[in-house]
Image: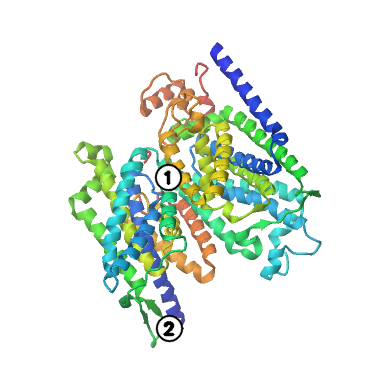
Amino acid sequence: MSEAAFLLGQVFNGLSVASLFVLAALGLALSFGLMRVINMAHGEMLMLGGYLAYLTLRAIPGPVGIIAAMPIAFVGAGIVGALLEWTVIRRLSARPLDTLLATWGISLILQQAARNLFGAVGVQVVAPAWLNHTISVTAGPLAGLNLPAVRIFIMLIACVVLGGIALILTKTRLGLYVRAVHQDRPIAAAMGIDTPRIDCLVFALGAGIAGIAGVALALLGPVTPTVGQSYIVPAFLVVILGGLGSLTGAAVASLVVGMITAVAQIFVNVSVAQVLLLLFVILFIQVRPQGIIAIRSRALED
Amino acid sequence: MNLLAKDRRYRIAIGAIVIGIAVAAPWFVGAYTLTLLARFVALAILALGITLIWGQGGVLSLGQGVFFGLGGYALALHLKLAGLRPGALPDFMTWSGVSALPGFWEPFRSPIVAVLGVFLIPGLFAAAFSWLVFRRRVGGVYFALITQALALAFSTLLISQQAYTGGFNGLTDFSVLFGINITSNAFGAKLYYGTLGCTLLAYFGLRRLLASRFGTVLRATRDGENRVRFLGYDPTPYKVFAFTVAAALAGISGALFTLAAGVISPALTGVVPSIEMVLWTAVGGRASLWGAIAGALLVNFAKDQISSALPSLWLYALGLLFILVVSFLPNGIAGLFTQEPAADSDGVSTRVLQRFIGGHDHSSGPMKCIIIHDSVRLDGHGLRESAVKPRSDAP
C-alpha cells in the first residue's frame, strides 16, 4: 500500500466520520441557535433511528428496506422530538442549564427503555447487497485504497440532508421564519410569527435528522441502547466549535472534528485521540471563543 | 428581629441534633451500614463543592467525576504501593507485562505526597482548565458540555491505559495506610469519624467563604455577569477560585470514598456518575449547603436500596428524578424550608446586585448603570473596585 493511498484512505475515513457528525450535530446546532438549549437526549434520537431501521428491515427485507428506513426514522424521531419539546423543553427553555439536566433524565429513561425492549447486547442491521461491497483500487499510484460502499453512501446522505436543510432555510417560508426568529425573537413574534411553533418544528426537524443519522450508524455496527452516546459528545463539541447555531459553522466544525479524529488515530489510539480533540477545542476557544462562524451583534448577552 | 433570632436559635438546635446523631451513629448501626454511611458522607463533600460552583456561582460542571477520580487515584496509587513487598509491582502490571514501575507512580510511594496530591492535583488541574475556559468568557451551556467531554476523555483514558491504571477494574485490594491496617472494623469507625470531620470542616468553611465578600461577588456573577463587569470586577478569578475549591473538595471526597469503598475505578469518574453528582445537589437544593449534604445522603441511600432490589428501575427513577426536580422543585428540598425567591441559575435576578448599589428601584439594567455612575469615581480604566463597596444602607 502506497503512502498516497494510505493518506487518501485516512482523509476518506475523516470525511465519513465527519458526515456522521454533521448528521448528529445539525439538529443540536439548529435548536441551540434558536432556543439556546442543548438537548442531552439527542443521542437517543440516533439510537431511535437505529432501532427503527432494524424494525423496518425486519418488516421489509430486501434491497429497498434501508431506503424505506430513512423516512420512517426521520418521522419517528421527529415525532418523539416534537413531544419532547412540547412537554419538557418548552417549560424550561428560559433556564438552559436546567434543560440540560432534564433532557439528560429523558436520555436515561430512553436508554433504559431500549434496554428492556431490545436487550442490552444490541441488534444487528445487515446492509443490503448493493451496499455490501468495497471499491478497491488495485493498480496505479493509489493501489491498496479501499473505499467501503456503505461509507460512501453515508457521505451521500449527509450531503443530501445538508443541501436539503440549506434549501429549506433559504428558499421556503418556514426557513424565512426560522431565520427571523434566530435573528430577533421578540421582533419576529411582533411580526406575527408563531415562535413556539417554529421552535417545535425546528426541534422536530433536528431530531428527525438525528434519526436518519441513526440509520447510517446501524449500517456501520450493532445498534445498542447507548449507541448514541459515543457520537453525541463529539457532536456537542461540533456545536461549540461551529458558533451559535450556524449551519455552515456546524458543517465546517464537523469536518474539523472528523479529520482530527481520523488523523489522530493514525498516530495514537482512540482514547488519546479523544483527549487531543478536547485539547484542540480548549485551544480553539482561546483564539475564537465565539466559534468558527460568529453572528455579529450589538447585543451584550446572547 | 425577634423572629430572626428565634429562627436562628432553631437552626442551631436542629444542626446540633443532626451532628449529635451523626456522631452517635457508630453505636447503633452495624459495621456494613457504617461503611455505607462513611461512603455517602464522603460523597457529601463533593456535593458541597457543587453547591459552591453551581448553586452559588451559576457554573454547571458535568465533569466533577474527573476531580473525584484524580483525588481517589492519587490516594489509591499510594495504597497500592504501600501494600507491596519491596521491589514488587502491583498485580495488574505484572499481568499486563509491565517490568518497571511507571515514572508517575514513583512519587506516590510517599504517603505525604499522596495526601497532598489528593487535593492539590485536582485543584491545580481545575484551576488551569477553568482559567483557560473562563478567561475567554466561555461559560453556561458551553462550559457544561466541555466538562462533559473532559469526563468522557478522562474515563476512556483510564480504561485504555490498562497497564498503568488498572483499566476498567480500577485499583482495589488495599491493606495499609500510614502503617495502619485499613481492613478492620475498628478502622471503619475511625474512617467514619474522619470523614464526618472533613465534611463538617468543609461545611463550615464554605459557610464562611460564602458569607464573605467573595461569596457576594460570586452570587452577583451568577445573577448578572456583565453587570458585575460594569461594576469594575473581573468575574474570572472568582469563578476560577470557586471551581478550584470545588475540585479540591471533589478530590478529598474521592480519596475518602476510595478508603471507605476499598476501590476506585473509571466507572465512578465517567460521564454518568459525574452528572449523577449534580443530581445530589439538585435534589437537596442547589444553593444550600445543608441541602447538598442531605441530597447526597438521600439520593445515595435511595440508589443503594432501589438498585439492589430492582436494578433496571433505578435508571428510570434517576431519569424521572432529574426531570421532576428540575421542572417542579428547582430549589430542591432546601427550597421547601425557605421563602427565598427561586434561585434561577440562568436568568438575571436583581436581588444580589441590589446589595452592591443599595438600590431600591426595580428598573431594569441600563437605569442601574446610570445610578452607579453617579456614586462612584472613574479612574480611566473603568470602575475602581474600592469605589463599589456596598453602601451602608444596603439590606
Foreground label between 2 and 1: 1
Q: Quadrant of residue B80?
A: bottom right
**In the visual, does B180 lie left or right of A97?**
right
Say which amino acid is labelled 2.
Gly
Q: Chain of mark 2?
A: A
**In the visual, does A299 lie left or right of B281?**
left
- Determine the residue positioned at 24% across, 43% down: A197
Judging by the rendered image, the residue that carries numbered circle 2 is A144
Q: Position of residue A30 (x, y in %)?
A: 32, 51
Q: Label 2: few (<14), some or many (≥20) within 10 Å? A: some
**In the visual, does B120 lie left or right of B213?**
right
Disc 1 on helix, strand or loop? helix
- Determine the residue positioned at 46% across, 80% down: A3
Q: Nearer the viewer, residue B140 or B132?
A: B140
Judging by the rendered image, the residue that carries numbered circle 1 is A100
Say which amino acid is labelled 1.
Leu
- Determine the residue positioned at 62% across, 48% down: B122
